[in-house]
Amino acid sequence: MSTLTAAVETRIVALNSQLEAARHAYYTLAAPIMEDVAYDLLEKELKSLVKANPSLAHLAPVIKTVGSDLTNGGRVAHSIPMLSIENFYDEASFLAWYDEKAMDGHATVVLEPSAMV
């Protein structure tokens, strides 16, 4: 294993660990340990490293899951689709998303700003 590969492997493991800890704190303990922006940046870096080094994907299981492993009686069927607004940090990005997804202005959107830790 080259020094570069070892460094990438070490970074992937560290990022995965940080993200798992953040998810546990957020979803299980209801006590976030980092801001959403910080989480998103770490996750973006991890996904980029895995994309560039697919043989190391097994070291990053956190990017294959969404939410928590808690169960509350199963999934809920929504009569209206629940759309994700992705990760927007400015009004222009949100407005572009809204223009694309708003169903000709007939959509109701509820926004909840993320609190900073």
Image: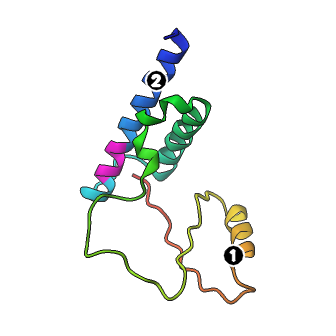
Q: Is residue 23 magenta?
A: yes
- The part of the image, by quadrant, that contains residue 66 is bottom left
Q: Is residue 35 above or below residue 17?
A: below
Q: Is residue 65 magenta?
A: no
Residue 81 percent coordinates (x, y): 55, 80
Whichever of callouts 1 and 2 sits on the residue coming sooner in the sequence is 2
For disc 1, the neighbor class at 10 Å (few under 14, some 14 to 19, many from 20) is: some
For the residues labelled 1 and 2, the Cα–Cα distance comes to 38 Å
Residue 61 percent coordinates (x, y): 40, 42
**Looking at the image, which residue is at 58% across and 57% down?**
87
In terms of secondary structure, what is the magenta stretch mainly?
helix
Residue 52 percent coordinates (x, y): 61, 31
Mark 2 is on which residue type?
Glu
**Looking at the image, which residue is at 64% across and 86% down?**
107
Q: Which residue is mark 1?
A: 101
Decide: marks 1, 2 in contact (CB < 8 A)? no
**Looking at the image, which residue is at 60% across and 36% down?**
51
Mark 1 is on which residue type?
Lys
Q: Is residue 105 above or below residue 51?
A: below
Q: Position of 36 compared to 100: left or right?
A: left
Q: For numbered disc 2, what is the local secondary structure?
A: helix
Residue 43 percent coordinates (x, y): 50, 43
| Mark closer to the observer (1, 2) | 2
Q: Residue furthest front?
A: 55
Residue bounds of the magenta highlight? 20-25
